[in-house]
């Protein structure tokens, strides 16, 4: 048992953790340079990584190369230059221009961040060549006609979502996959024409419901399998069902409908872990995963530990530990934020894609390999602090830098949060580890402008604008326009999900010991897998 250097909580480094660290430790000239055990608990490690990621807060600023006005996740206050996506992905600048010799009389991080502050950053973390008419999106790729879509890939005509992947015409959704025409849906897979649907799979035309599989035309239902025309878990004929729904919705606001559904839902058993097709896994919101521990919001993982928000790619993400975002095929990697697109053996990196054997680097893409302490590199190999070396020179110098890091007690540690280019409350860390320092906005500060479709949020007082395609969606789905700002709607959805933390408790039915994200103090009836399946089938 160890004590976390940050929060002082006790945590365990398991034998499996130790075995993984030994396996991914880098080798130079046939000598393995062991990665030490972590000094922070899993929560503090995740918080540190996530403090380097801003998804939803945008700033207007100027591109430091072409000088045009741009939208950026970085404010104009940061030290480093920021380029628009066209400029950053172009050949109009050379990252090796900023190369430095390594100085063994100075700390590694001091030298790396000196390089980082000279090297251009992309304004948004998007794979520019794959984005079509989707300028107001971030941490995304392969999007078409999307607006304010975050941490999302391979979707079309979607708006105001986070974790919306392989979806079409969905709005205000959170962590959905392969869905169509969905609204205010959370943690759903392969669903269509549904609203206010939670934790459900392969459903069509279901509303204000949760934990449904293979259902169609259900309203206010929970824990059903392969049912149709069910209202509050009771079956009706088609005409009776439609009449029931119309009568129930009459003179009730969406908030009223939601509250009544939640009251009904809380009377029924909850599954200890939200998953689909998993084997020997702990965590929450996992799909098609095997032998994973303490992982969250991920799909197609195997032999992974303490990972979150990794997406399905052409192959399974295999043998990773402490990776936050984004997956799509990442292997043998450790302590990285935003590693993916077939990244392999990336250690202590931030935004490294399509690359392998890259250590302590940032913003390196497009088939880079054998980099140490580099920033902004593309198609590069055998570089240290952006300086080019021969393969033999790199193999000799890299292990010396590791020994230097060991003397500083920095080898094995991710980038410190204080060097992040974002304010803490801009980052995803603030969503899961809030510090409660957000400034309040005066609700009387701005007037609504209905002529230009500008409204004032009923909760925060922030103005927000309705897009024409958004209004068309509401009309087609028979929905009222929203009362709240998109950011407020996001945090409402986030509050509905269980924490990324595991507890020991007993099954509410058989009293068997289980591990769940429901803490023992929570009043819900939480069932083990066996009891839950017996209750719903």
Image (spheres, rainbow, N blue to C red):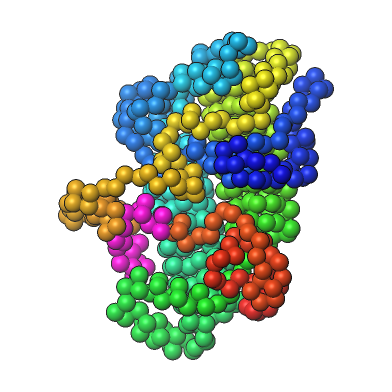
Q: Residue at x 60, y 36 (%)?
A: 5
Taking the magenta stretch, the answer to whether it contains residue 487 is yes
**Image spot of residue 131 (x, y percent):** 45, 41
Quick check: 109 above or below 302?
above
Q: Residue at x 65, y 65 (%)?
A: 505
Q: Residue at x 59, y 32 (%)?
A: 414
Task: Quadrant for the C terminus, please.
Answer: bottom right
Q: 129 left or right of 25?
A: left
Residue 339 in sight: no
Q: Main secondary structure of the magenta part?
A: helix
Residue 333 in sight: yes
Task: Quadrant for the N terminus, please.
Answer: top right
**Image spot of residue 342 (x, y percent):** 65, 39
Q: 178 left or right of 134?
A: right
Pick the residue in front: 411 or 188.
411
**Image spot of residue 60 (x, y percent):** 31, 34
**Image spot of residue 44 (x, y percent):** 57, 42
Quick check: 192 above or below 502?
below
Taking the magenta stretch, the answer to whether it contains residue 103 is no
Quarter of the image where one finds residue 15: top right
Quarter of the image where one finds residue 77: top left
Q: Which residues are magenta?
A: 471-492
């Amino acid at each position: 048992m160890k004590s976390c250097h940050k929060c002082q909580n006790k945590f365990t480094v398991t034998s499996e953790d130790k075995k993984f660290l030994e396996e991914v430790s880098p080798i130079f000239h046939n000598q393995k340079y062991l990665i030490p055990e972590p000094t922070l608990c899993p929560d503090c490690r995740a918080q540190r990584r996530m403090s380097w990621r801003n998804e939803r807060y945008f700033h207007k600023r100027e591109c430091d190369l072409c000088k045009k006005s741009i939208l950026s996740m970085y404010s104009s206050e940061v030290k480093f230059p920021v380029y628009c996506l066209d400029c950053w992905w172009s050949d109009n600048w050379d990252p090796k221009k900023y190369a430095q010799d390594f100085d063994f009389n100075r700390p590694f991080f001091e030298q790396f961040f000196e390089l980082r502050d000279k090297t251009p950053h992309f304004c948004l973390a998007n794979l520019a060549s794959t984005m079509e008419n989707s300028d107001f999106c971030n941490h995304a790729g392969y999007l078409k006609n999307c607006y304010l879509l975050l941490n999302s890939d391979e979707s079309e005509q979607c708006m105001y979502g986070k974790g919306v992947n392989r979806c079409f015409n969905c709005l205000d959704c959170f962590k959905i996959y392969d869905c169509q025409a969905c609204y205010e849906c959370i943690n759903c897979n392969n669903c269509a024409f549904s609203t206010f649907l939670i934790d459900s799979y392969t459903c069509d035309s279901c509303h204000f419901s949760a934990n449904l599989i293979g259902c169609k035309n259900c309203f206010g239902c929970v824990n059903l399998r392969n049912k149709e025309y069910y209202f509050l878990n009771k079956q009706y004929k088609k005409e009776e069902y439609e009449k029931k729904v119309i009568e129930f919705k009459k003179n009730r606001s969406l908030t009223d409908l939601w509250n009544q559904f939640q009251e009904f839902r809380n009377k029924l058993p909850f599954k200890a872990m939200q998953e689909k097709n998993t084997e020997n896994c702990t965590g929450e919101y996992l799909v098609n995963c095997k032998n994973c521990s303490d992982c969250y919001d991920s799909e197609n993982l195997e032999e992974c530990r303490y990972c979150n928000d990794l997406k399905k790619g052409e192959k399974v993400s295999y043998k990773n530990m402490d990776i936050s975002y984004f997956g799509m095929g990442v292997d043998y990697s450790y302590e990285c934020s935003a590693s993916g697109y077939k990244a392999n053996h990336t250690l202590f990196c931030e935004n490294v894609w399509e690359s392998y054997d890259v250590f302590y680097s940032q913003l390196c893409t497009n088939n880079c390999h054998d980099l140490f302490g580099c920033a902004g590199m593309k198609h590069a190999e055998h570089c240290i602090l952006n300086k080019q070396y021969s393969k033999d020179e790199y193999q000799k110098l890299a292990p010396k830098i590791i020994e230097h890091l060991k003397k500083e007690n920095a080898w094995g540690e991710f980038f410190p949060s204080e060097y992040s280019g974002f304010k803490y409350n801009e980052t995803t860390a603030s969503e899961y580890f809030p510090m409660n320092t957000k400034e309040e906005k005066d609700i009387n500060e701005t007037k609504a402008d209905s002529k230009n479709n500008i409204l004032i949020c009923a909760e925060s007082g922030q103005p927000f604008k309705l897009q024409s395609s958004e209004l068309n969606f509401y009309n087609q789905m028979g929905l009222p326009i929203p009362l709240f700002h998109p950011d407020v709607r996001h945090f409402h959805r986030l509050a509905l999900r269980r924490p990324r933390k595991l507890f020991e408790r007993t099954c509410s039915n058989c009293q068997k010991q289980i591990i769940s994200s429901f803490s023992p103090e929570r009043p819900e009836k939480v069932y083990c897998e066996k009891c839950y399946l017996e209750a719903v089938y």
